[in-house]
Image: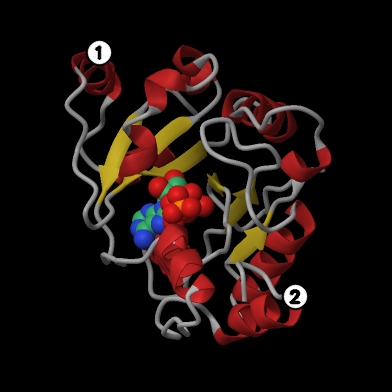
Amino acid sequence: MVISEPRCSATVLLGGTFDPVHQGHVNSALELSQYLSGQATPTQMVHLLPNSQPVHRLTPQASAQQRAQMLALATAKYEQLAVDERELCRQGPSYSVLTMAEVRAEIGPQQPLIWCLGVDAFAGLLHWHRWQELLDYGHLLVLSRPQATWPTNTQLLTWYAAHQVAEAKQLLASPLGQVAHLKLGQYAVSATQLRQQLCTGQQPSALYLAPAVAQYIADERLYGI
Ligand code: ATP
């Protein structure tokens, strides 16, 4: 499956567990699309990519199919967002390096591939499978997140400095090999916080959980509802 589209200048992926998808994910992806498009009308697609077997965390509470369904509901009204289910269709742990290699093979050597992750996920990068090879396939773009601080690990920071470009937009100028940091609007929400609220009978604000997703969670009796 070739996921890039002719009007896109890059293939942009935001990987995660999305248990459940929240407005921090959706709004960050929308803003990122706008930022990379460089114009008021966003033309750059951002693909939200749910993992099947997350490697560094507990098994998700919602099934892969439920998480994909919630993503479909949350992104339905945005042309510039899409859901990429490739990791759900693959056996074994959802290693990002394998996904990036697969996508690179599909899009060919020239197109920029940008793998986005929050700064909390970036802090754990040295524990990722074959992390040194990630930049052989694409770029990494680290997104700020409220309450998540910039890592202090020397090895990680040295690696970051060796590949860093000053502005995230510069990632569009080459296919792979660089890292950048981008501060978007700060959305103080996490899936953990939403699961806790739902399980204690609170209704999360629509600012944080899209109403269609909240309805799906209630219908499926997810997260201890
Ligand atoms: P949990 O609380 O269960 O760990 P989460 O809210 O971090 O979940 P994930 O599905 O793990 O959600 O996140 C997918 C990716 O999106 C990760 O790289 C994460 O850092 C990033 N991300 C999640 N929430 C935000 C947010 N509010 N702002 C910016 N990035 C975010």
Q: Is residue 205 left or right of residue 184?
A: right
Residue beneath the point at 41% across and 34% down: 140
Instruction: Give the amino acid at mark 2.
Output: Glu
Marks 2 and 1, Cα distance to the nearest angstrom?
A: 44 Å
- To which residue does mark 2 refer? 220
Q: Which mark is residue 155?
A: 1
Q: Residues within 10 Å of mark 1 (few under 14, many from 20)?
A: few
Residue beneath the point at 59% across and 24% down: 97
Name the spot of residue 136 as percent of width and height, x first: 52, 17
Looking at the image, tell me whether mark 2 or mark 1 is earlier in sequence order: 1
Q: Quadrant of residue 151?
A: top left
Residue beneath the point at 24% across and 48% down: 148
Along the viewing direction, whichever of 4 and 22 lies nearer the viewer: 22
Along the viewing direction, whichever of 79 and 39 lies nearer the viewer: 79
Q: In the picture shown, does residue 212 fall above or below 7?
A: below
Name the spot of residue 215 as percent of width and height, x first: 65, 85
Is residue 36 among the parts visible in the rendering?
no
Name the spot of residue 36 as percent of width and height, x first: 40, 56
Q: Is residue 94 left or right of residue 183?
A: right
Where is the C terminus found, in terms of image quarters? bottom right
Instruction: Give the amino acid at mark 1.
Output: Gln
Q: Residues within 10 Å of mark 2 (few under 14, many from 20)?
A: few
Q: In the picture shown, does residue 125 fall above or below 208?
A: above
Is residue 95 among the parts visible in the rendering?
yes
Q: In the picture shown, does residue 33 fall above or below 198?
A: above
Callout 1: SS: helix
Residue beneath the point at 39% across and 19% down: 126
